Image: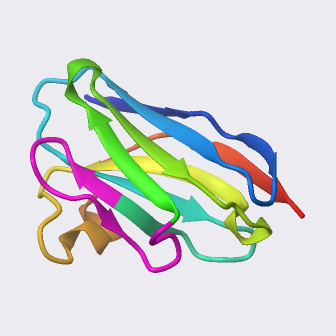
Amino acid sequence: RMRLAESGGGSVQAGGSLRLSCAASDVITWSYCIGWFRQSPGKEREVIAAIYTGAGGPYYADSVEGRATVSRDPADYTVYLELNNLSPEDTGMYYCAANPGGCAGDYWKVQKGYMYWGQGTQVSVSS
């Protein structure tokens, strides 16, 4: 069973940047839509970005469009999320997840399609 592990979270001041990593292990096949999710205090979990491990994407939610960059390194089964110009509204737990059904169309937005999940990494942005 594939496992995902996020890292790179922390505390940052508004206007700053963070680069989160999602590293996969026990990989048998590397053909997934990797999504990044955020759950902010008092809010539902939302998908904010995604990329296909092969060719496809990236895709961004409106809340991070223009501030986020998703990239992949197929050599070591890692996907990255760089988020710039952070604001306190970006505070939350960030998760990555893998969807074997791909990202095409709006499928990357369908949370129930994601089969594997990491434990999350906390991001705290102070004003």
In the image, residue 9 above or below residue 59: above
Relative placement, left or right, of 52 versus 61 is left
**12 or 121, which lies in front?**
12
Q: How many marks?
A: 0
Position of residue 39 measured from the top left corner of the image (x, y, whole percent)? 61, 64
- Residue 31 quadrant: top left
Residue under the image location 21 percent in, 28 percent down? 74
Q: Is residue 70 visible?
A: yes
- Give yes or no for residue 115 being in the magenta stretch: no
User: Residue drawn 80% across and 56% down?
Assistant: 125
- Could you tell whether 16 is left or right of 112 in the image? right
Asked if residue 65 lies in the magenta stretch, the reply is yes
Residue at the image point whose x is 45% and y is 72% from the top: 65
Describe residue 49's horizontal placement relative to residue 90 as left or right. left
Which image quadrant for residue 23? top left
**In the depicted structure, whether residue 34 falls above or below residue 62:** above
- Residue 119: tell me if it is visible: no
Q: Quadrant of the C terminus?
A: bottom right
In this view, 48 is above or below 62: above
Q: Looking at the rendering, in which quadrant would you find the N terminus? A: top left
Q: Main secondary structure of the magenta part?
A: loop
Q: Position of residue 3 (x, y in %)?
A: 36, 30
Q: Position of residue 56 (x, y in %)?
A: 13, 55
> 121 or 75: nearer the eye?
75
Give, as a single range, the part of the protein colored magenta. Answer: 50-66
Picture quadrant where residue 103 is located? bottom left
Q: Is residue 79 above or below residue 67?
A: above
Q: Position of residue 7 (x, y in %)?
A: 57, 32
Q: Would residue 23 appear left or right of 20 to someone viewing this image? A: left
- Residue at x-position 12% and y-position 58%: 101
